[in-house]
Amino acid sequence: MSHSLPTAFRSTVVGTLRREDAGDRVRLAGWVHRRRDLGSLVFVELRDRSGRVQLSFGPDWTPADVLERARRLTGETVIAVEGLVVARPEENVNRDLPTGEIEVHVLALEVLAEAETPPIPVAYGPADELPAEELRLRYRYLDLRREELQRGLAVRHQLLQVVRRFLSAEGFWEIETPMLTRRTPEGARDYLVPSRVHPGEFYALPQSPQLYKQLLMVAGYDRYFQIARCLRDEDLRADRQPEFTQIDAEMSFVSEDDIFDVGERMIAAVWREILGIELATPFPRLTYREAMEKYGTDKPDLRFGMEFQDVTALLQEADFRLFQETKGTRARIRGVRAPGGARLSRKELDQLNDVAKAAGGSGALWVRLTEEGLAGPFARALEGELGQRFIQETGLQPGDLFVLVIGHFRTLGVVSESHLGATEDVWQVGGAEAVLDALRRHLGDRLGLRDPAVHRWAWITEFPLFEWDEEAGRLAAAHHPFTMPHPDDIAKILRYTEAGPLDRDAARALFLQGVRSRAYDAVYNGHEMASGSIRIHDPKLQRHIFRALGIGEAEAEEKFGFLLEAFRYGAPPHGGFAFGVDRLAMLLVGAGSLRDVIAFPKTTAARALFEGAPAPVGPDELEELHIAVIGRSTS
Ligand code: ASP
């Protein structure tokens, strides 16, 4: 939608001017984008948020003193002009500019603000390289003048508006929750804020509104959402921001289906309104186990198939040392069929080893099917009937490549390592799945199967409830401690936690039970876009989970007493989700980095560059906050 936004300084913004406006007298205001001096004529591209328009200063229509001043205009000067919209002759139409069919013949000019030469350019040609990102972040307000960043923020704005409209129409209330809070565990460290009036006490900035939104459900608010700022003090990683935004929602009296229905219709509305693309709903659903077994990852890129195939039994029949060595071990031989992959060059095939190694593996093996038969390092071991069976089982077509890795896969299977004498299904420790996942994605790229014009969303369900923290020797919540266990696995948890908090052995044994949860993610083209879960609403079960996590009664009371207390007064069954706004906006505009869709991002070292944060504070201020600093950063 385009607006003309008239104000005291202008009759319209520049970007909406069209051929139909020819003959109009307009007042415009904005920045000097570029100036070209053509002897008697001076052309200035005037820029505002809506776009650019060509101002034309000429002796036939511009007063001489104005023309003289126009010659001295420098880039980024803020000006206001008055002039006449004139249609350009056909040969002068600029097809690259939406306003390119007209120009404005300037009659009057006022300089509203001078501009020094900017330390980074604002006007770029198509071939110009951007300055280093550090420099651009240092002068963010100048970099934000670039069209590309503006587009990112425009799409982000649209995204938030579509979401607000959609959720509001679905009966969700937008409710703000506090920034100065008590800890909400989401698996990261908290940013702490010292209290001046309560010496030695600290607020935590929210890692998410998780506890508040659950309390809103206890309070009977039924459907809540918030465009929530979340703060997590995590270790630095490229493209991770210490503060980020989520579309955070919670619903009462729901099961997964209700939540998925709202979530996927919300995303479909976003795709429709912003990209003009109709997504198919409902989104497919895969359990975590299926995702791991088929794709080796909990965020599979479903734009292409290439599912993992287990060829252990078959290849153990082959006379090939690496395959023979897997006999009697837990190692599996799994691979993917890459359609058309036989065309990869020798060099590209060698690269597969590098991809495997970068993902932590020892290497990759491959075999291809040509018109002459199987070819590759172990093809000789597959001569005759065995080779025929291999081709049949894997579905290899002439021209295909089969790439495989040998190793331990994280998979649900029976082992005898267990507590309380029972032998049950357990999650086996793996690693090889990540190697094959990397190869699958690499081959997907190489074979052009990861088409940006294809949009594949899915829900991944039944995530494991626990993770194993080897160092601490205890369980950790894989999502957060308020996630409801899978109904079929509750009995296991209760059995282990009857007596109290778990010691290391018991915790490890419970981990190996492969307890599933009612947590889910939304994934899109191989990216994790949202997480959520059905929550525990029974204080007794919540206590058992705390025990499983090694949190004793006193600690649970101290940290989450208010939640447990609230649950005693009638908590409805509830659940929700949080979608990452930054990543959604980034993928919607096709930006290369989260920083391109955040107005004032931090660097990868978590610093704000132009305003300079974090920064030391003086001794008086520290004293007022009852804080003594025992070390200083040197970075
Ligand atoms: N609070 C969760 C998160 O930030 C999302 C949710 O469970 O709704 O990942």
Image (cartoon, helix red, strand yellow):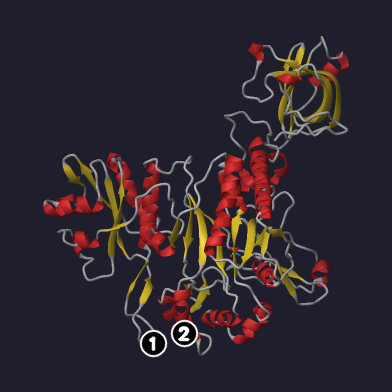
Q: Is residue 188 above or below residue 546?
A: above
In the rendered view, does 189 fall on the left or right side of 428?
Answer: right
**Tag 2 and tag 1, C-beta contact below 8 Å:** yes
Q: Residues within 10 Å of mark 2 (few under 14, many from 20)?
A: many
Q: Which mark is residue 330?
A: none
Residue annotated with mark 1: 420
Q: State the image coordinates of residue 529 (x, y, percent, origin top left).
A: 54, 55
The structure residue drawn at horizontal position 29% and vertical position 51%, both measured from the top left corner, is 403
Q: Is residue 536 above or below residue 11?
A: below
Residue annotated with mark 2: 496
In the rendered view, does 175 fall on the left or right side of 389?
Answer: right
- The Cα atoms of the two marked residues, 2 and 1, are separated by 9 Å
Secondary structure beneath dot 2 equals helix
Is residue 523 something one can see in this rendering? yes
**The N terminus sits in image quarter:** top right
Mark 1: amino acid: Leu
Q: Nearer the viewer, residue 90 or 344?
A: 90
The structure residue drawn at horizontal position 28% and vertical position 64%, both measured from the top left corner, is 332
